């Protein structure tokens, strides 16, 4: 359903206000504010179960183990990611992890050989990630992402709170540096994604992910040698039925 102009403007005003109110707030406190106080039952944490995902999943589990966690299974993920998801879910006691998958009919029509990533990676991301997420978000007023400013130039000016397509989008780790992420994982002895030790600092689908070399941005291994730097989840309007 397309958002009305009033809803879009309302979300934008609310995001701008919350961005000021929440600036300087401790991240676990911010997570509690949005999950338990502001959007109870109406906010989802989006997680790739990637290199840094355990931080926000841990904070959410401490607040409410039934927090909805949306996990996009593109059907082209590393087996290590699926195993890591299972490990973290058991470790944290999460009870509401929702796997989003592309529609089989759409894959059969547009990507029957699983090679669309090579010829048209933007469309591949749309049918495997963006459209399933847009449809899933219909049930929520707000969502939480794990993006950080240090990850690369497209995220350097990331706000703490944004509005998009009439929804509030919360980026609690926007201002966290890499060493704070590592420090948190160590402090709580959280399990690490097994591919991190092999140089994968940002982990997506198998065909579009490679290890990162010393000195590169953490996301340099995504769509390497291509102009593409984002999958579209954070650059396209996410509402079901959008022309994507
Ligand atoms: S990251 Fe690559 S394989 Fe995964 S959905 Fe996007 S283009 Fe397709």
Image: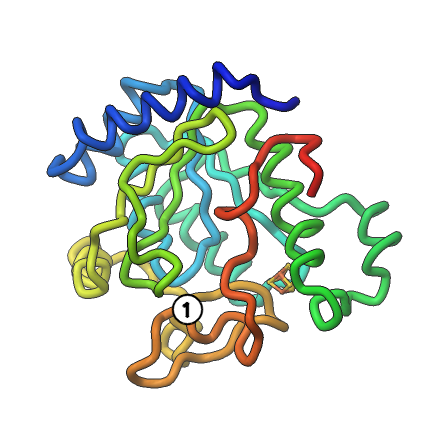
Q: How many labels does the image show?
A: 1
Task: Tell me where residue 62 appears, x and y as whole percent.
Answer: 26, 35
Q: Which of the pair 171/155 is nearer the observer?
A: 155
Q: Which of 179 and 59 is in front in this view?
A: 179
Q: Residue at x 40, y 22 (%)?
A: 11
Specify whether 179 is left or right of 69: left
Q: Where is residue 82 in the image (x, y as percent from the top left)?
A: 55, 58
Question: Mark 1: is the Cβ under 8 angstroms from ligand 1?
Answer: no
Q: In which quarter of the image is ligand 1?
A: bottom right
Question: How many C-alpha atoms fall within 10 Å of the one at disc 1: few (<14), some, or many (≥20)?
Answer: many
Identified at 70% across, 58% down, the residue is 124
Name the one closer to the observer, 26 or 5: 5
Residue at x-position 29% and y-position 52%:
157
**Residue at x 71%, y 38% (from the top left corner):** 243
User: Disc 1 on helix, strand or loop?
Assistant: loop
User: Does 202 appear above or below 54?
Assistant: below
The answer to which quarter of the image holds residue 113 is bottom right
Q: Mark 1 points at which residue?
A: 219
Provide residue 74's location: percent of width, then percent of height. 65, 55
Residue 35 in the image, given as x and y percentages of width and height: 32, 26
Residue 13 vertical position relative to residue 56 in the rendered view, above or below: above
Looking at the rendered image, the quarter that the N terminus falls into is top right
Q: Is 81 left or right of 126, judged from the image as shown? A: left
**Is 229 located above or below residue 126 in the figure?**
below
- Outermost residue on the top side: it is 6
Residue 66 showing in the rendered view? no
Looking at the figure, which quarter contains the C terminus? top right
């Amino acid at each position: 359903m397309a958002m009305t102009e009033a809803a879009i403007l309302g979300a934008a005003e609310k995001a701008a206000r919350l961005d000021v109110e929440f600036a300087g707030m401790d991240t676990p406190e911010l997570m509690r504010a949005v999950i338990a106080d502001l959007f109870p039952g109406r906010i989802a944490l989006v997680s790739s179960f990637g290199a840094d995902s355990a931080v926000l999943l841990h904070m959410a589990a401490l607040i409410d183990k039934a927090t909805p966690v949306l996990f996009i299974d593109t059907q082209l993920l590393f087996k290590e990611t699926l195993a890591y998801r299972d490990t973290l879910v058991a470790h944290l006691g999460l009870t509401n992890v929702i796997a989003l998958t592309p529609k089989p009919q759409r894959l059969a029509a547009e990507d029957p050989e699983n090679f669309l990533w090579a010829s048209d990676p933007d469309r591949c991301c749309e049918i495997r990630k963006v459209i399933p997420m847009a449809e899933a978000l219909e049930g929520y007023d707000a969502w939480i992402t794990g993006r950080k400013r240090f990850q690369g130039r497209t995220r350097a000016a990331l706000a703490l709170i944004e509005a998009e397509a009439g929804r509030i989008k919360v980026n609690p780790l926007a201002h966290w540096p890499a060493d704070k992420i590592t420090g948190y994982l160590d402090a709580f002895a959280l399990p690490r994604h097994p591919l991190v030790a092999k140089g994968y600092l940002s982990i997506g689908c198998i065909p579009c992910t490679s290890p990162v070399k010393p000195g590169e941005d953490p996301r340099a291994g995504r769509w390497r040698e291509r102009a593409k730097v984002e999958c579209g989840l954070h650059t396209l309007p996410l509402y079901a039925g959008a022309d994507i």
